[in-house]
């Protein structure tokens, strides 16, 4: 008993805990390394705003979901754990969907189908199974934030290049000038690349990001 009382608790922001947030951003990114959550990266990244909203939605769902599953892990019978996880993530997605409809109704219409598909996002169910069921709430929260942020980072990068090169805008605001009145770069003959707004270009952009990351980290090539 005395030995147990003398054991120091691990600091909340220990190096190991910080790694739970940091590692999924680059070295173990769920999209570029684990190749998960690809569908939404292709479907909703034509606009940077939609990418950011989806990223924030997944961060909320995964962080909160991980905590809830961690708190309930000793109460959920193994035979119904998948059903319980689906109930938790579905409830959180409903909260996200209603919030978007209340504050950004136009964007909520564009994202309606894809917000619903967060329920079946393999990153979320994977983290529930692989981490939240075996760890405490704090570590589960950090793991959820890290993996969702890693996913969101890729969405934002892809959305940035697709909207900028596809329509010459960011968050809907012109960056290169007015293509109709031929101002800014358009006066020099620049033309928007409409192909960037198509799903195949999202896949190519994502492929370039994966290639760039693996060229900088040779261990990823060896592992795969």
Image (tube, rainbow, N blue to C red):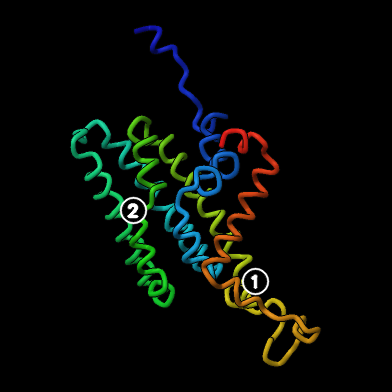
Residue farthest top in this picture? 2
Q: Which residue is mark 1?
A: 164
**What residue is rendered at 33% in x and 34% in y?**
133
Left or right: where does residue 21 sit relative to residue 118? right
State the image coordinates of residue 11 (x, y, percent, origin top left). Answer: 51, 27
**C-alpha span from label 2 to label 1:** 30 Å
State the image coordinates of residue 223 (x, y, percent, origin top left). Answer: 57, 33
Left or right: where does residue 137 sit relative to residue 157? left
Q: Quadrant of residue 182?
A: bottom right
User: How many numbered discs, if any?
Assistant: 2
Q: Secondary structure at mark 1?
A: helix
Q: Earlier in the sequence, mark 2 or mark 1?
A: 2
Q: Nearer the viewer, residue 66 or 117?
A: 117
Left or right: where does residue 1 sit relative to residue 9? left
Quarter of the image for the C terminus: give it: top right
Q: Which residue is mark 2?
A: 120
Category of crowding for the residue at label 1, using alpha-carbon neighbours closer than 10 angstroms: few (below 14), some (14–19), many (at least 20): many
**What residue is rendered at 49% in x and 47% in y?**
35
Q: Nearer the viewer, residue 47 or 88?
A: 47
Instruction: Tell me if residue 128 comes above or below residue 54 in the rendering.
Output: above
Residue farthest right in this picture? 188
Left or right: where does residue 224 sit relative to residue 54? right
State the image coordinates of residue 1 (x, y, percent, origin top left). Answer: 34, 8
Q: Quadrant of residue 130?
A: top left
């Amino acid at each position: 008993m005395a030995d147990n009382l003398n054991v120091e608790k691990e600091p909340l922001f220990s190096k190991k805990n910080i790694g739970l947030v940091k590692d999924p951003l680059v070295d173990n990114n769920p999209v570029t390394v684990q190749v998960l959550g690809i569908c939404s990266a292709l479907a909703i990244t034509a606009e940077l705003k939609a990418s950011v909203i989806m990223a924030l939605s997944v961060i909320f769902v995964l962080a909160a979901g991980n905590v809830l599953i961690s708190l309930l892990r000793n109460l959920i019978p193994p035979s119904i754990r998948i059903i319980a996880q689906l109930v938790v993530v579905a409830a959180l997605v409903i909260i996200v969907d209603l919030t978007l409809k209340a504050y950004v109704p136009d964007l909520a219409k564009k994202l309606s189908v894809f917000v619903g598909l967060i329920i079946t996002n393999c990153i979320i169910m994977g983290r529930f199974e692989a981490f939240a069921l075996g760890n405490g709430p704090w570590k589960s929260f950090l793991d959820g934030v890290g993996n969702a942020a890693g996913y969101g980072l890729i969405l934002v990068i892809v959305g940035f290049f697709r909207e900028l090169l596809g329509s010459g805008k960011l968050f809907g605001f012109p960056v290169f000038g007015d293509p109709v009145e031929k101002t800014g770069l358009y006066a020099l003959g620049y033309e928007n690349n409409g192909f960037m707004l198509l799903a195949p270009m999202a896949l190519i952009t994502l492929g370039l990001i994966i290639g760039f990351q693996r060229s900088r980290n040779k261990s990823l090539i060896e592992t795969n």
